């Protein structure tokens, strides 16, 4: 492109800008505050940028004040330079000079304020409307950062959309290094709300608004759906690894699928600090893995989070009633999971994930060379104690009776492994500040209490499968209380299937995902050739 062509392009852009500003319905007051007698490079740059914009339109009303002016006191301005944009209508301030990439942010801010409309989409606005208390937002930016304008403009849009609750400050870290140091904002963009870090990097407007509402970092946005009735092929009850995987495979098979989860997506995985040796990852944060699964699933399925399935009426189609709506479906997959039974002692929940664990396979390697307790007396406790010993962990078994409930061959292996057992003993309290440091033990016969220093407490006292819904709709259970099924995840009720921990088994993420995929493929095959119409596999017998 030659110089003449480039010049013509620039003239066209400036002409278009003038036309755009001329069409705005509102004036745009911009006030520059500076320290008296200190006309530094940042003040000069801010002034020059504003004067350049002012030449484009008379919609911009630009005025300068020093920090001793009554307006500075009125709006609590104490830094130089500070730009206030339409301060009578909105709380938008700029600490620094909008140079480089940030000139894009300033342009968009001026246009948004002049229009008087945030321009946020319906989903982002729906989230913002839920905010019922003030949000003081700080977005740390830099003139050299190409990603900062997106995050900064998100903040401006929020301030224009909800001026009664959202106040925004854009902080140039080059002009305000002390603030950057105070907030550890050496990488940009970073966003704080009410002095809580709620986001790093540029995000979509929906994620930005959701982080403001929740006052925490958010990496996944699930669109809301107000439809009172949803027609679908498959309803998956449960948003853990099994349910999310089933949703992906069902949709990929051509089945319209909805995943309904009453709590947090990911189930137990979401609260697991580190997941080790999930295929493809030597280790990965549990929440990170869940977000990856959920983001993948959202490319295919509709996820309805925060809804509890209350009933499944066995009609044609099946009627699934939740706490918010009805679903009409051809099949239902129960992927409701199972919960570890808890000791219920002081310190257990507080130190969960910080030395208290319910999975030796998952967390055992972290304790190599250190002493831990394994609490329990059944097959699972003995098996997991042996796993820990094989990993090089110094493990001591704690059992509240004088005899183990585990099978004889496991007890023999335990003895051969020379693993100590504290008989007639139960954990009364788990102690520690940042992690497990010791436990208070109580003898169940004498009542004597002792303290023992340990680095971890592993609990294996059984699982409580989430089968309340299964019971309600008449699904058969095994003698152990899990959902009974045939080899292809079919239950005794035609059209109702199960997958994951609710079926029992190994309680591993990788097996749950495999079961979810297998169940989805079975459902697809049964949609084509319904076994209940031919009499094949007409019922599933209970099995232990």
Image (cartoon, rainbow, N blue to C red):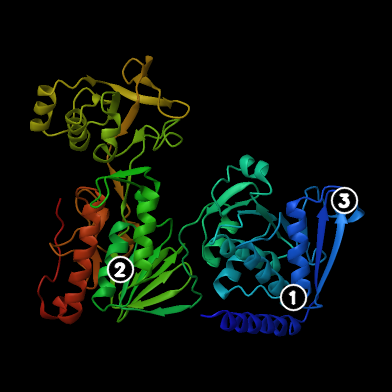
Q: Does 344 sit above or below residue 171?
A: above
**Which residue is located at x 55 percent, y 72 percent?**
123
Label pair 3/2, CB-CB below 8 angstroms: no
Q: Does 250 sit above or below residue 8?
A: above
Label pair 2/1, CB-CB below 8 angstroms: no
Q: In this view, does 45 lie to the left or right of 177?
A: right
Examine the rendering and report whether any part of residue 157 can be seen: yes
How dense is the environment of label 2, judged by Cα within 10 Å: few (below 14), some, or many (20 and up)? many
Q: What element carries label 2?
A: helix
To which residue does mark 3 refer? 73
Picture coordinates of residue 460 (x, y %)? 27, 36
Image mark for residue 247: 2
Residue at the far front in the pictured view: 3
Image mark for residue 234: none
Picture coordinates of residue 337 (x, y %)? 31, 54
To which residue does mark 1 refer? 114
Q: Which of marks 2 and 1 is nearer the N terminus?
A: 1
Work out how far the residue at label 2 is from the one at label 1, CA to CA, in angstroms. 45 Å
Q: Is mark 3 on a helix, strand or loop?
A: helix
Q: Is mark 1 on a helix, strand or loop?
A: helix
How dense is the environment of label 1, judged by Cα within 10 Å: few (below 14), some, or many (20 and up)? many
Examine the rendering and report whether any part of residue 92 can be seen: no
Work out how far the residue at label 3 is from the one at label 2, CA to CA, in angstroms. 57 Å
**Which residue is located at x 33 percent, y 62 percent?**
472
Q: In this view, does 397 lie to the left or right of 165?
A: left
**Which residue is located at x 72 percent, y 77 percent?**
115
Count of numbered circles in the view: 3
Label pair 1/3, CB-CB below 8 angstroms: no
């Amino acid at each position: 492109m030659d110089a003449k062509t480039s010049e013509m392009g620039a003239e066209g852009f400036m002409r278009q800008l003038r036309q755009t500003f001329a069409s705005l319905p509102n004036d745009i007051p911009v006030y520059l505050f500076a320290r008296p007698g200190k006309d530094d490079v940042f003040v000069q740059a801010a002034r020059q940028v504003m004067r350049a914009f002012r030449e484009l339109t008379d919609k911009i009303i630009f005025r300068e004040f020093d920090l001793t002016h009554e307006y500075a006191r009125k709006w609590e301005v104490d830094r130089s330079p500070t730009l206030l944009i339409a301060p009578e209508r909105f709380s938008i301030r700029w600490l620094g000079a909008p140079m480089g990439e940030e000139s894009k942010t300033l342009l968009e801010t001026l246009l948004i304020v002049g229009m008087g409309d945030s321009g946020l989409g319906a989903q982002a606005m729906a989230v913002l409307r839920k905010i019922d208390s003030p949000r003081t937002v700080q977005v740390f930016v830099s003139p050299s950062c190409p990603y900062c304008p997106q995050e900064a403009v998100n903040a401006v849009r929020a301030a224009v959309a909800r001026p009664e609750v959202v106040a925004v400050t854009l902080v140039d870290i080059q002009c305000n290094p002390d603030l950057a140091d105070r907030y550890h904002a050496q990488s940009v963009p970073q966003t704080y709300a009410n002095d809580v870090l709620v986001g790093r990097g540029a995000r979509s407007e929906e994620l930005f608004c959701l982080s403001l509402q929740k006052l925490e970092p958010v990496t996944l946005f699930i669109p809301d759906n107000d439809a009172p009735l949803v027609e679908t092929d498959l309803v998956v009850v449960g948003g853990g690894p099994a349910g999310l995987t089933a949703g992906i495979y069902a949709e990929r098979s051509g089945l319209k699928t909805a995943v309904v989860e009453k709590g947090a997506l990911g189930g137990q995985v979401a609260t697991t600090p580190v997941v080790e040796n999930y295929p493809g990852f030597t280790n990965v944060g549990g929440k990170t893995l869940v977000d990856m699964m959920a983001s993948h699933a959202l490319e295919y399925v509709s996820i309805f989070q925060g809804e509890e399935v209350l009933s499944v009426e066995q009609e044609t189609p099946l009627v699934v009633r939740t706490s918010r709506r009805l679903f009409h479906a051809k099949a239902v997959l129960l992927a409701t999971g199972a919960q570890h039974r808890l000791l219920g002692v002081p310190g257990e929940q507080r130190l969960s994930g910080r030395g208290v664990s319910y999975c030796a396979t998952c967390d055992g390697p972290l304790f190599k060379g250190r002493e831990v307790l394994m609490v329990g007396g059944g097959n699972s406790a003995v098996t997991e104690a042996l796993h820990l010993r094989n990993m090089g962990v110094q493990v001591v078994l704690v059992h509240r009776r004088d005899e183990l409930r585990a099978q004889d061959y496991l007890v023999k292996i335990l003895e051969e492994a020379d693993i100590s057992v504290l008989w007639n003993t139960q954990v009364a309290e788990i102690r520690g500040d940042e992690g497990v440091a010791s436990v208070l033990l109580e003898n169940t016969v004498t009542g004597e209490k002792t303290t023992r220093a340990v680095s971890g407490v592993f609990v294996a006292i059984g699982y409580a499968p989430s089968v309340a819904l299964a019971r309600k709709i008449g699904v058969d259970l095994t003698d152990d209380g899990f959902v009974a099924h045939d080899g292809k995840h079919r239950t005794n009720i035609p059209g109702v299937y199960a997958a994951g921990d609710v079926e029992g088994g190994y309680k591993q993420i990788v097996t749950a995902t495999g079961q979810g995929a297998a169940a989805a493929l079975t459902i697809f095959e049964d949609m084509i050739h319904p076994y209940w119409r031919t009499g094949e596999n007409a019922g599933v017998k209970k099995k232990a």
